[in-house]
Image (cartoon, rainbow, N blue to C red):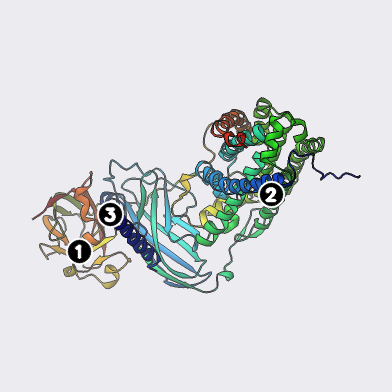
Amino acid sequence: MATSVFDLPPQPYTGEKARLTRAYDYLILVLALFLFIGAFHLHVALTVGDWDFWLDWKDRQWWPLVTPLMMITFPAAVQAVLWTHFRLPLGATLCMACLLIGTWITRIFAYHYWNYFPINMVLPATMMPSALVLDVILMLSNSLTVTSIFGGMSFALLFYPSNWPIFAQFYQPVEYGNSQLTVADVYGFQYIRAGIPEYLRIIERGTLRTYGQFATPLSAFCSALLCTLMYPLWWQLGKWFATTQYLKKI
Amino acid sequence: MISKTIKTLLGTAFLALTALAGTPNSVYAHGEKALEPFIRMRTIQWYDVQWTQNKLEINDEVVITGKFHVAKDWPRSVPRPEATYLNVSSPGPVFIRTERYLNGQPWVSSAALQLGGDYDFKIVLKARLPGNFHIHPFFNLQDAGAVMGPGHWIEVAGDPAAFANKVTTIDGEVIEMESYGFANGVFWHVLWIGLGTAWLLWWVRRPLFIPRYKMLKSGMEDSLITSLDKTFAIVIIVAVPVFVLGAYAVTDSRYPNTIPLQAASDQIDPLSPTVNDGTVRIKGIRTEYRVPNRSMNMVMRINNLSDQPLRIGEFATANLRFINPSAGLSAENSALDQGPVAQEGLKVDSGEPIQPGETRTVRLAAADGLWETEKLEGLFRDADSRLGALLFFYSATGERHIASISSAVIPKFD
């Protein structure tokens, strides 16, 4: 009999047992979907916040430093559960998919329809490429150490180039008010935000300019280093909170 | 019995709250009265704020102009105005701000203000969405909050789809800001979400939690990750970075002249003195706030150094204006801005003008219920209960001189 790439390996359950366990899968998946949409989205809104909300916060220093560092957290914790107990290499991708669903819902309904901002001014960043690579590094290595080092670094280093095709055009220069601004700066000036004056932006501040104008690679490698530490920390958090005691009774 | 009563009370409270939430009352305030009185009185002292029109069509422009004095007696508990931003309080970007000037200089970023400095400003707003909006110019002061200027209702009519906002880049490309880059952003998000979803479905299509847990625990780990899974993983680990870097390089070549976000502060000097220009000198002697009368009673020594007799025409603090009816101000002078005005709220003990060179001790009373409705009567309950205000003097020829007042306030409760 011919086999297809979509054929599944032999399974331990058949019949009614298989049907029940599959129903349980769907139940958990739906719950996980809503849980991660809410929890991860809230986590990113509170930690990355304005850097992800607004075009004119996406600078070359803090944005590529903060975003991967704060976004590797939930993926690491979820991977700890799904890989350790189920050998499912999809924790990071699942988190990012949930995050993007929540983010897009918020940007469309809260920022655009409720608060009137054009959606292009509040385009979110994507970390889906980083998440895919993180998942497959864990799967291929089956090692926390290797994933922390190479996965964590890849996660951070892929962030800026992944998002450059989305955002590069907003960094074109514009002469405005007798000054040179980016298109993104013009959005910040024109579209009124009463609670976010310009001086609140944490952009282009700090000492990462040691190598002149090459701030982005420095930020990316700094973030990569920190992600290698953040990844195992949140892996341990995930491991600590997760339990399979109910599965053992089945 | 008790639990039934509690349940009834909780049920009633729930129904009442639900009914309250469903009441279609609109909230129009921007918190302009929420800031402590001493900050509203002794930081940014607005005057002469004007709007060019109050009825617009979509794409029409309204210009807000005005002046402000930065109080020299700046509260000690408020950080110095080293980073400030002249903003517009509106319900979101129902207007866009196309231009902003401080002392005639274009102003796109933040700037420091000088204590005791005088400034004039101009903001150009372009109507974007229809509605009836209450608009204030206001200052964001770093680490202090928002100090509101006077508010004004503006009605916008028309079709929001007609709104256009074109900007030209330095390379000469004309872009429509309302939609620029949106389709491109959606394309990349859909692409990556699609690839991520494919990876998720690759795994989700097979039995997941209980069977895999059992297989893992019974030593069947090798069956959980097939060689085909590993092949896909290798493809991903190679193809994703290659694709990402390739797209990065293509984008970089498409937009070769990108620049970083601009973070400079604007440097704008104050005007030559308009307030405290040397023609009138004031020394506050005593200020009492009589709570039952809602009256600020001031005794001050005023020295007229100008060459004309001067009358006291107006006392203004925190956008609250008290007009001296005996000064005979023109309607134009007494209604320049849209702030709350007590048209007969200022009483001066003598109707005689202060002669050139004369130094006179004057008693003033600024009395009106506005002290209470504007929530300024709580000044004496502030930790820094000092008054800050502007006093407007007029000559017989209509020439105006402005002096700032600063004084401790003593409450009188009887």
Q: Is residue A218 above or below residue B322?
A: above
Write down the quadrant of residue B309 in the picture. Answer: bottom left
* Distance of label 1 from label 2 (alpha carbons): 60 Å
Badge 1: chain ID: B
- Circle 1: element type: loop
Mark sitting earlier along the chain (3/2): 3
Q: Is residue A122 visible?
A: yes
* Circle 2 residue: B193
Write down the quadrant of residue A139 in the picture. Answer: top right
Mark sitting earlier along the chain (1/2): 2
Q: Residue B2: which numbered mark, if any?
A: 3
* Distance of label 1 from label 3 (alpha carbons): 47 Å
Q: Amino acid at mark 2?
A: Ile
Q: Is residue A149 above or below residue B39?
A: above
Badge 3: chain ID: B
Q: Residue furthest right?
A: A1
Label 1 Cα crowd, 10 Å radius (few <14 / some 14-19 / many 20+): some
* Circle 1 residue: B369
* Residue A18 point in image, percent of width and height: 71, 45
Label 3 Cα crowd, 10 Å radius (few <14 / some 14-19 / many 20+): few
Q: What is the number of callouts on the image?
A: 3
Q: Residue at x 36, y 64 (%)?
A: B20
